[in-house]
Image: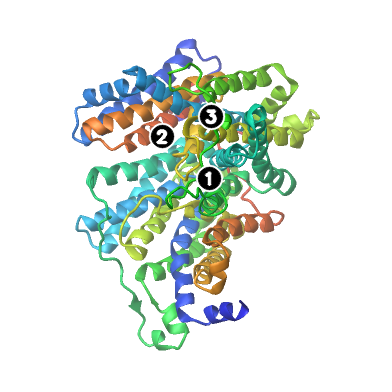
Amino acid sequence: MGGAVIEILISASFWAAVLRIASPLIFATMGELICERAGVLNLGIEGIMVIGAFAGWMAVYLGLPLWGGVAVAFGAGALFGLLHGVLVVPFGLSQHVVGLGVTLLATATAYFAYRLALPEVTTPPKITPFQAWEVPVLSDIPLLGPALFAQTPLTYAAFACAGVVAFVLYRTPLGLALRAAGENPAALEAQGVSVSGIRIGAVMVGSGLMAVGGSFLTLSAFSSFFFEMVNGRGWICIALVVFGAWRPGKAVLGALLFAGFDALQIRLQQTPLGAVVPYQLFLMLPYVLSILALIAMSRRAQVPAALMVPYTKGER
Amino acid sequence: MRLEPVANPTLLRQLGLPALALCATVLVAMALALLAGADPFAVLGQILTGALGSRLAVLETLNRATPLIFTGLAVAVAFRAKLWNIGAEAQLYAGAIIAVLLGTGAMGAPFVLPVSAVVALLAGAMLLLVPVLLKVRLGVDEVVTTLLLNFIMALFVSYLLEGPLKDPMGMGWPKSPALIPEARLPRIVDGLRLHWGFALALIAAGIVWLIQTRTTLGFEMRAVGANIRAARFAGMPVNAVLVKTALLSGGLAALAGWSEVAGAKGHLSLDLSPGFGYTGIIVAMLALLHPLGVVVTALFVAGVFVGADAMSRAAGVPTYIADMLLAVALLFMVLAIALTRVRVVRG
């Protein structure tokens, strides 16, 4: 048992899989993090990932280049983000209810559009997905090279995205305004900045990133779209934001840790252990871990002070 | 543009805006039909006749509404106390598992139905108790934990159906053995395909209504939901109220699964619930969390699903139109309710 685990941990394919599994989670976790740092819980995430997976795939299927598909996914996500933002920010509706509504609507829209476009398919059609891009020189390093530097461009983009989010959040006036919207919106308004504008903008960009995370599944991982492919990843990302204490760096570490366990359980199924333990128990691991992560962080969580608090101009 | 509160909304405003929301949903339905290349009026007509057009259609709608009344009540009870139970799907399966465990020969005739109902209720209650205790003791957000439990439960059911609860005669299909006849809910009227689960759902709605309007617990649940700080300041045992709410909500959701197995299906399979737990959220919100309203909206939602199935076979518009319309109806409705209390003004 211990030997099998060590054997898995020293294989390059394991670490390559960790980065691959983490990529969509990093995009979507960054998206949710932006929303929540601005003070808006976005439970639309699960559905927005579905619409991103579908829209990105459909665009490429219809002839757009792969990066065009990513852009379409971002746009589709931003559109549903706009819907969520308008309903919960100026109107102050329940972020829980609207978020779940957005998830249901986005999911149903993707499924409806898929069936409309391809009514009679039994095997989902494939596109040519992103291919691995080996970084010259670096990918020749033993073990590390094939694990870290022979990924698809979207994986590199996921890590770049986390870096950009962290930079913008902590090193730019825009990031300051965004964090203020989530901590002390009255102070932000006193500076002459529109809290509603910042919040809606944050939800749109954040939702766009969630959708890009979804599109990773169709454009980089699986090459076709099928029902229930997102399978709770959005909810896991909400747990990852909490686990990462609303900080981009920690959230990326959380995503990597989580992806590590996921990659491990897939491989453990192939070992003698997998013959004894039912495979469903392995598949439960990611969800159980997410709950454990929430419990572990419960006492230390530093929730943005104005998260889920609607802001009305001039009210105290 | 800004929002201005409306102090005393007129009756016209209170009724007109939700009505407008429903009309807008119908317009969306017609637009989607056009998009699918079908005649919008024909599609609306086919949904209507598919749901209500014949005796068979009406019975199908009533049957489909049964689990939705239970899950709708479960969500309505929880959301009223601002307890975000999104795990009705998992609690439903907990009840379904109990119906199989006790209903396949473990118990005999007079006791099996009432005992399995009570145990199912307890199982669902226990399943929601875990996230709620995590919430009140450790401050762990119950939205995510209840959501994640749905996925864990789905895998657990899959394990049971391929392992301990697998039907040896099932030709390899992952389904449970059939319930013994004594463990099945009988039909309300002989010859009509409608089981007692529907009647029990109506009774449950009545009981929940009585609890909410006529008991201290009901008052406390509403107080906790309206303003948890004020409730705490007034000396209410807020955590105890949340726990009791959870027990009631989880139990109701479990009865949905129990009645589906004992009444409608007679066995447990992985496709027992096409998302009844999630649809319960729509049912509850459209009913404005009113327990008697849940009965009405569950019938409406069931009708949309049953009607859309029939329409899809005839007009070729994908059945997912039903899910889209219900999500749209939900969003329009919460907006309409908000607009009864505020108005948009210039400046």
Crowding at dot 3, Cα within 10 Å, few <14 / some 14-19 / many 20+, comes out as: many
Observer-nearest of B225 and A246: B225
- The amino acid type found where label 3 is placed reads Gly
- The amino acid type found where label 1 is placed reads Val
How far apart are the alpha carbons under marks 1 and 2?
A: 20 Å
**Mark 3 or mark 2: which is in front?**
3
**Residue B163 at x, y = what percent?**
54, 54
Residue assigned mark 1: A40
Dots 1 and 3 on the same chain: no
How far apart are the alpha carbons under marks 3 and 2?
A: 15 Å
- Sequence order check: which comes first, mark 3 or mark 2? 3
Return the mark for residue B72.
3
**Residue A195 at x, y = what percent?**
51, 43
Q: Quadrant of the N terminus of chain A?
A: bottom right
- The amino acid type found where label 2 is placed reads Ala
Question: Residue farthest to the right?
Answer: B235
Residue assigned mark 2: B327
Question: Residue farthest to the top?
Answer: B11
Give the chain letter at badge 2.
B
